[in-house]
Image (cartoon, rainbow, N blue to C red):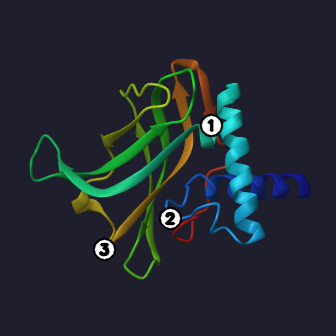
Amino acid sequence: MRTTLSMLVLVIAALGCNKADPTATEASSASPGKKAASSAAASSTAAAVAGDLGVNSLEVTWTGEWKPGDNPADEFPVLSVRNKDTARPLTYFLGWFYFYDKSGKQVGREFREVYSINIAHGEKTNVTAGPKKASLPAGTDKMEFVVTGANFGAESQKFRVATPPPEKRPMGG
């Protein structure tokens, strides 16, 4: 039981660390926790360089923008997707959208898969994918995406998180 609980805590911690803070800098990182996070990010980058696949092999964030679908009345979120792998194209990813109101309170979550993409190694691009704007939970102001798996190149070059992220998750991780 302890082993299972310990594994769950490690997976949840890893999932919460997949989004970099664009406003943080090493110089302003005075707290030991932030320095440890920077070290973890550096080691995850090294792992991606070495060819290990995991949640740090890609970065997915909502741009705050919406694009119309085939039916112009339907709008879908625009995601910024960065393939951090150094050798393989990103061809598929899956995970959870978390929805938050203006105060940062979670108002829902939804599982999604994004396929039929081909993002070259090291490339960053925008992808229109996710739930329709009209179907979001009432009060949604912000969204975050937590990666739980991806394919790189071939079906055999993939990773999946064994334990899904928590039902409830604070905004920002």
Query: Which residue corresponds to the image point at 43% horizontal and 32% vertical from the top-left?
Result: 123
Looking at the rendered structure, the kind of residue marked 1 is Arg
Task: Say which label, 2 or 1, has the lower sequence index.
Answer: 2
Q: Helix, strand, or loop for circle 1? A: strand
Q: What residue type is disc 3 on?
A: Ala
Disc number at residue 131? none
Left or right, residue 166 beside residue 66: right
Examine the image and state in which quarter residue 34 appears: bottom right
At horizontal 80% and vertical 51% (from top left) the residue drawn is 7
CA separation in Å, label 2 and label 3: 29 Å
| Residue 77, x across and y down, in percent | 29, 52
Residue bearing mark 2: 23
The residue sitting at the right extreme is: 2
Left or right, 36 with reference to 108: right
2 or 3: tag closer to the N-terminus? 2
Q: Is residue 131 left or right of residue 154?
A: left
Amino acid on which the number 2 mark rests in the picture = Thr
- Secondary structure of the residue carrying tag 2 is loop
Q: CA distance from mark 3 to mark 1?
A: 31 Å
